[in-house]
Image (spheres, grey):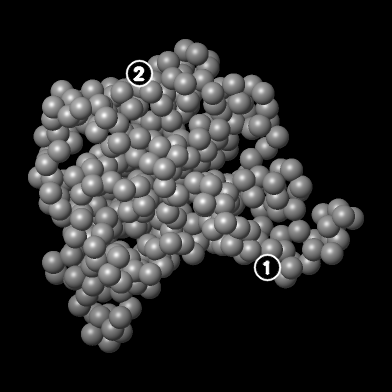
Amino acid sequence: MPSPAAGPSFAWLTPEITYVLLLFTLFILPKFLQRFRIPSAVTALAFGAVAGPWLGLVHDDATVNLLSTLGIVSLFLFAGLDVEPRELRKEARVLVEHVVVRVGALAAVAAACAWALGLGARAALLVALAVMTPSTGFILDSLGGWGSSDSERFWIRAKAIGTELVALAVLFVAVQSTSLARLGLSAVALAAMIAVLPIIFRWFARAMIPVAPKSEFGFLILVAATCAIITRGLGVYYLVGAFVVGMAAQQFRGSLPALASERMIGAVEAFASLFVPFYFFHAGTELVAEDFSPAALAVGGIFLTLIVPFRVGLVAFHRALRLGEGFAKSRRVAIAMLPTTVFALVIVDILRTRFEVPGYVLGGLVVYTVVTTLIPGVFFRLPTPEFEDELLLGEDHAVSAVSRSGPLSS
């Protein structure tokens, strides 16, 4: 955090005062701004941009970095825990078709980015992922406040999860494909981690639960953080490891119910509510002046003009063709899947640190991310709920759980 050396006008900002102000800006002001349909994710990102590149108050602060890491880990752990294979299998054919269509669209957008922006194949693929991949954790948490029906919730959840699963695999290949040897070794390391997780969970159920009851939550967070650090070391960021742990824990719902129960999912969601704002704030502090240049705004505008209608039309066309659904209904599903929030910001960080991508392209992705995050709240004419609103998990979360297994008809 800043010290008196940050500048004479901020000499009075001791670390203690700064942290208090930070808590106020992340947990109080966003509540006020939500009445204007501004999600707290966007508010925290904006505050980070002001405090970082504009005022120079925050730069590489260890505390903020730690809290940010806990935020991204818990968010993707929550998304992984919410994957229910049995539910997805009920409409597997439609979901597989959706994934195939999205993969084809991803390839087309990547080719267009490579041609129009002069990017290499790997960088262009990452840019395509950033503009095409819905941010599942953010979307899942926001469904309750968008007035979606049970059927719409199912399709939004299922399609967002299916798309993100493919996106994570593509992200892994894109980042690690500098050589076949590196890709192979990384794939073996990731496969080994996935193979060991069931062994760890069985050991915990057999050896630890009897002597350390009610330790499931702490253990799950610990395993998620460890695996997230491993995948970060592999170069694919924290999100892959945390998401895999959530999915692995879901497989033990029968033999170890407490590990992936609705109560546990709610607890992880509440934990994420505390730390996710720090992730967005930290992402804001990493922005630079070039991210807000006229060229960046122009690129962001082009992305919005071309990609948003393309994504909405893609979902609407597939649902009309496959389910006979009208555009007015299908666009509700498509618009709810627009926010790219976390996934895009993660890719911006990867592109900034590992690829030679022009700053105006990164800035354009940030502009695109902010606007797509705002669109559903404006379209549904409701303030977008945030993780802070999910701390009361009792009956409301139980109702949400029932809706996840509700009617699947279109």
Label disc, if present, on residue 108 of the rendered structure: 2
| Secondary element type, mark 1 | helix
Residue that label 1 marks: 20
Other residues around mark 1 within 10 Å, as few (<14) / some (14–19) / many (≥20) = few
Given the image, on which type of amino acid does mark 1 rest?
Val
Given the image, on which type of amino acid does mark 2 rest?
Ala
Other residues around mark 2 within 10 Å, as few (<14) / some (14–19) / many (≥20) = some
* Position in image of residue 218 (x %, y %): 38, 73
Residue drawn at x 24%, y 66% is 398
Image-based side of 158 in relation to 23, left or right? left
Residue drawn at x 57%, y 56% is 32
Residue drawn at x 49%, y 57% is 276
* Position in image of residue 37 (x %, y %): 49, 46
Q: Quadrant of residue 96?
A: top left
Residue sitting nearer the eye, 349 or 232: 349
Q: Which of marks 1 and 2 is in front?
A: 1
Image-based side of 399 in relation to 57, left or right? left
Q: In which quarter of the image is residue 170?
A: top left
Name the quadrant of the C terminus. Answer: top left
Image-based side of 339 in relation to 283, left or right? left
Name the quadrant of the N terminus. Answer: bottom right
| Secondary element type, mark 2 | helix
* Position in image of residue 175 (x %, y %): 43, 35
